[in-house]
Amino acid sequence: MKKVLSSILLFSILLVFVFGVGAQYKYANPIRIKNNTSTTLTNVQVLIIFNTAIPIANGWMQPNGNDIRFTSTCGGSVFLNHFLEGYINTDTTKIWLKVPSIGPNDSTLVYLYYGNASATSASTLSVFDGPHSGCDSVVVTSTNTVSNCQRGFAFTPTEDVLIAYFGKRIPNVTQRYVTLFDATTQALLVQIQVDPGVAGQYNYNLLPTPFWARTGVQYIIALYNGSGDMYYYGTSSQIGQHMTYGNMRYRNTCTQNDFPNLTLTNYHYGTPDFLYFVKQNITPPPTVTILPAADTTTPAAPTNLTATAGSGSALLKWNKNTEFDMKEYRVFRNTVNNPATATQIGIVNHPDTTYNATGLTNGTTYYFWVKAVDRYCDPKISAFSNVASCTPGGGGAVVNRSIVLPTPGVNTNYVMIPYNPAMNWTSNQITIEAWVKIGGTTTANTVLNKGAASFDYQLGINASTANPFFRAQGTIVLGSSITIPANVWTHLAVVSNGSTVVFYVNGSPAQTVSTATTLGSSTNEMRIGRGNADPGSGKLDEVRLWSVARTASEIANNMCVKYIPNTTSGLKAIWHFDSTFVDSVSGFNGTAVGTVTFDTANNCMQTSIKNIQSEVPTEFYLSQNYPNPFNPNTSIKFSLPKDAYVELKIYDIMGREVATLISDPYKAGTYIVDFNAGHLASGIYFYKIVAGGFSDVKKMILLK
């Protein structure tokens, strides 16, 4: 049984490249290959299905794939043999890779590199074992001359073989057609003209595209003899070791395209040949996992780092890096303005661009920097960002909190804002909005009231029906078709233009009532959480007061925007309740009356949280939202194996926080959070959970 190696195959000999890939090849995909057997695999051929259409479309890869290379180490200097089979610029490009070794039930990482405009093809059949002769280099010596005829033999592979060359051995040296047929369907599969060569010797030509001959399928290889052509013949059934011989096939008075339909047993006439390659047949085959692409370029330093002081903490924010292969940001701190001696204090997964530095000493000035890190196998780390500094000390904390109102029936706890002339205006247009989480319906829940008993204007929630109501002096307008749920954060807004009152729930118009209303103009105080005899209950956050009738889009687009510009038209006041009672506009100062307390807020667009499993999970877990894509409602499930403080936030594609769904302590268990994104634009968003030492980020798609 002969294995053929002729001079025309020298290009297939293993080539070793002794230069690193860093400077020449810009892009890389790590690929994990798993050995699913209990024995070591050595020099095993692994089929990788790779989407070359994406890198080619982005200009990362040559259109013909000539710059494809593999290494067994990150940035390695020796390239592994690979063979590019079939078509490129598709989502299913086939690439065979020869992997040196994979241990029993073990995995290995290899690295697919590309991105070198000057590279030439390194695709080689040396990935496989071969070449082998199809007729086992049979030599028969009798000669004959028959013009315009087909001469060949039938064979059946005993395993898949890759036919790469057609060849022939003839007495007179002329160019001849060699053709491969399917013996069952008689279909012409592959045909080329083989060069004249040397009389009495086999010579071969490479096929434009090598052909897989499959196990158990019978094929016919035929040599066409033109006018005056001679051929060898003789008794023999010699065949390559990876196939079985069928019979001699021939046809007279025909063309090269005609199927040879006549047979003789135990003969070789012709003699045509082909060279083929074989691979290891592993059961079960290795598993291939292609990891996300990266490039060898160092990312830019993050920009616009800011630090906002809290009490014993600092909230850091920066711009999101735009490199496609970003992985994380590393946060550094120092007590002097010197990044060289700074200490790394945390890691933030991209695309999140905020970090809350805790454990700081009030009164001490701290300096902060951030570095960007990509996901290249040898991570590329940016230079330091700009420096940001602050001095923690309370009062300036940015902590997302909400005001907690007393149990219904208690009438002494609220926030009082002394009278300010700016609380009254001549127009009858008004907008009041807030995030509310009512605690019950024993007594009415007041969101905001100006004038106490005079009720210059008021937004509240009815005690028995949970309907929202708007009051302007003696006129009460009830949102009778709306029910505000208890113990669930809801965004509630009312807009009155003097003749029409519109109630909004979670950014959407819920009820419109045509009623004339006139605002009062007393010099009485303003109250949040209490009217006159109507105490509130539950929680309130982000209370806003406007002297204009806000539009539906303005309400929907800003209900989850915490820091809207102070210059926004008609904005009278905002109460964040995050640090003090001082509002962000106009100096309406608030004072706590009674035993008003605070809790961490988790309001934006949360509709409900359900504990769906009483059995304690064994691990932290964040599931993919369902449905996904969604419009506009979706659900997010997470599991806690132990009690933990949980934060669940939503970010847009630019890394900006657009919603806080959870920021509260939770008992161990499995929960589902319903999320309404009705006011957000279509696009890609990310949701991130932080629970104890666990964090995870997943992608969701909003399609409207």
Image (cartoon, rainbow, N blue to C red):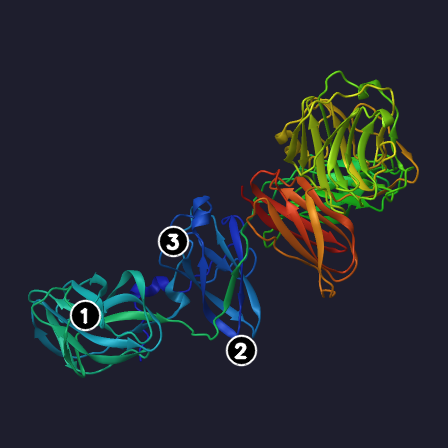
Work out which quarter of the rendered image holds the C terminus and state it: top right
Q: Around disc 1, counting alpha carbons within 10 Å, would you say few (fewer than 14), some (14 to 19), or many (20 or more)?
A: many
Q: Decide which of tag 1 and tag 3 comes sooner along the chain.
A: 3
Q: Nearer the viewer, residue 599 or 240?
A: 599
Look at the image and tell me whether residue 197 can be seen. Answer: no
Q: Dot 1 corresponds to which residue?
A: 222
Along the horizontal axis of the image, is 145 left or right of 472? left
Secondary structure under badge 1?
A: strand
Q: Dot 2 corresponds to which residue?
A: 39
Find the distance from the CA under tag 1 to the CA under tag 3.
Answer: 30 Å
| Residue lying at 51% horizontally and 54% vertically, measured from the top left | 19
Q: Nearer the viewer, residue 426 or 677?
A: 426
Along the horizontal axis of the image, is 364 left or right of 256? right
- Give the image location of residue 590, x and y in percent: 87, 30
- Residue 19's tag is none
Q: Is residue 414 above or below residue 699?
A: above
Type of amino acid at the residue the image marks with label 3: Ile
Contact between labelled residues 2 and 1, with CB atoms less than 8 Å apart: no
Q: Around disc 2, counting alpha carbons within 10 Å, would you say few (fewer than 14), some (14 to 19), or many (20 or more)?
A: few
Q: Decide which of tag 1 and tag 2 comes sooner along the chain.
A: 2
Along the horizontal axis of the image, is 254 left or right of 350? left
Secondary structure under badge 3?
A: loop
| Residue lying at 56% horizontally and 41% vertically, measured from the top left | 683
Work out which quarter of the rendered image holds the N terminus and state it: bottom left
Q: Is residue 467 above or below residue 46?
A: above
Q: Dot 3 corresponds to which residue?
A: 88
- Give the image location of residue 336, x and y in percent: 82, 39
Q: Nearer the viewer, residue 3 or 63?
A: 63
Find the distance from the CA under tag 1 to the CA under tag 2.
Answer: 42 Å
